């Protein structure tokens, strides 16, 4: 099982903070997972456009070609604006 | 010391903690602190209020990581980073960074490094209430270039 979490605009556009997803080997990397989620509908496609999107795996900032493993917590969010 | 909190913070109390000889022994003779506050305007718009969201868990880990990097790079003691989340108003304090070192150069540089890296690495997001409603704050290119200057030569 994968835990997927969303923050800020990304969360607001899809109106959902988190979801659980059955892991399959088809999710070979974060880009594959992003494409799978983006195909859920227009809002998901909009929220998960790659140009203004960051991704973290198990709370570590990651690259799109990072491998996805069963049990991972994957987070999608816009560039950060703290401080 | 790292804290993510909704409550305001008192810089006099934090100064005492930063310099109390347990966190940073008295050999650390230079103290540099930074406080960030909510502005009442941003990108030509009046800001009436702000909401700050974060990613609990990852926020603390990312702040710990940038402290480890700062300590590896400069001879500093144990820094203090406080970041507020939740609803804030113009003039409210958002972030505190305090650094102690034996001499001023390392303390100034490490403090600037910590805020520059916090701004591009720590998962916080600001949303401003303006005349045209709530708007998420866009990440600034200038914050990225400020952090880039710390890349090792």
Image: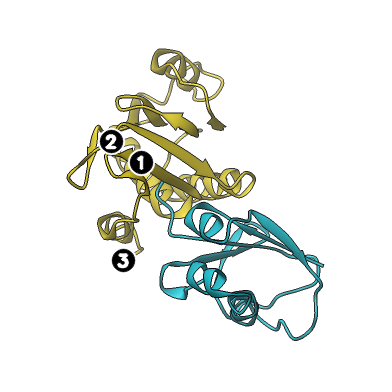
Q: Mark 1 falls on what kind of element?
A: strand
Observer able to see residue B81 = no
Chain shaded yellow: B
Q: Chain of mark 3?
A: B
Q: For this view, does A70 lie left or right of residue B101?
A: right
Whether residue B9 appears in this view of the structure is yes
Crowd class of label 3 (few under 14; some 14 to 19; many from 20; radius 10 Å): few
Quadrant in the picture for residue B15: top left
Which is nearer the N-term, disc 1 or disc 2? 2
Please tell me which of labels 3 and 1 falls first in the chain: 1
Q: Answer yes or no: do the residues labelled 1 and 2 have beta carbons within 8 Å?
A: yes
Give residue B94's position: percent from left, percent from top: 40, 31
Viewer-proximal residue, B109 or B81?
B81
Q: Residues within 10 Å of mark 2 (few under 14, many from 20)?
A: many
User: Separation of disc 3 and disc 2 at Cα?
Assistant: 39 Å
**For mark 2, what is the residue?**
B47
The x, y position of residue B134, in whole percent, is: 38, 44
Q: Residue furthest left?
A: B44
Whether A50 is drawn above or below A10: the answer is: below
Image quarter of the N terminus of chain B: top right
Q: Nearer the viewer, residue A65 or B65?
A: A65
Q: Secondary structure at mark 3?
A: loop
Q: Which chain is assigned cyan?
A: A
Query: Residue beneath label 1, please?
Result: B128
- In space, the residues marked 1 and 2 are separated at their CA atoms by 6 Å
Q: Are marks 3 and 1 on the same chain?
A: yes
What quarter of the picture does the C terminus of chain B occupy?
A: bottom left
- Residue at the farthest bottom position: A26
């Amino acid at each position: 099982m994968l835990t997927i979490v969303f923050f800020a605009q990304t969360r607001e556009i899809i109106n959902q903070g988190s979801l659980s997803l059955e892991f399959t080997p088809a999710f070979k990397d974060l880009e594959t997972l992003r494409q799978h989620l983006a195909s859920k509908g227009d809002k998901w496609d909009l929220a998960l456009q790659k140009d203004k999107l960051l991704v973290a795996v198990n709370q570590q900032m990651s690259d799109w070609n990072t491998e996805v493993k069963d049990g991972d917590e994957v987070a999608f969010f816009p560039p950060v604006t703290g401080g | 010391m790292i804290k993510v909190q909704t409550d305001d913070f008192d810089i006099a109390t934090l100064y005492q903690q930063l310099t109390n000889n347990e966190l940073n022994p008295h050999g650390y003779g230079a103290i540099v602190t930074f406080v960030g506050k909510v502005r009442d305007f941003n990108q030509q718009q009046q800001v009436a209020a702000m909401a700050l969201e974060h990613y609990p868990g990852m926020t603390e880990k990312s702040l710990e990581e940038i402290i480890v990097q700062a300590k590896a790079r400069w001879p500093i003691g144990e820094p203090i980073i406080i970041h507020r989340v939740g609803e804030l108003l113009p003039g409210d304090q958002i972030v505190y960074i305090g650094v102690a070192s034996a001499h001023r150069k390392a303390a100034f540089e490490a403090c600037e490094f910590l805020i520059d890296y916090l701004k591009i690495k720590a998962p916080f997001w600001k949303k401003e209430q303006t005349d045209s409603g709530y708007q998420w704050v866009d990440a600034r290119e200038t914050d990225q270039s400020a952090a880039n200057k710390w890349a090792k030569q």
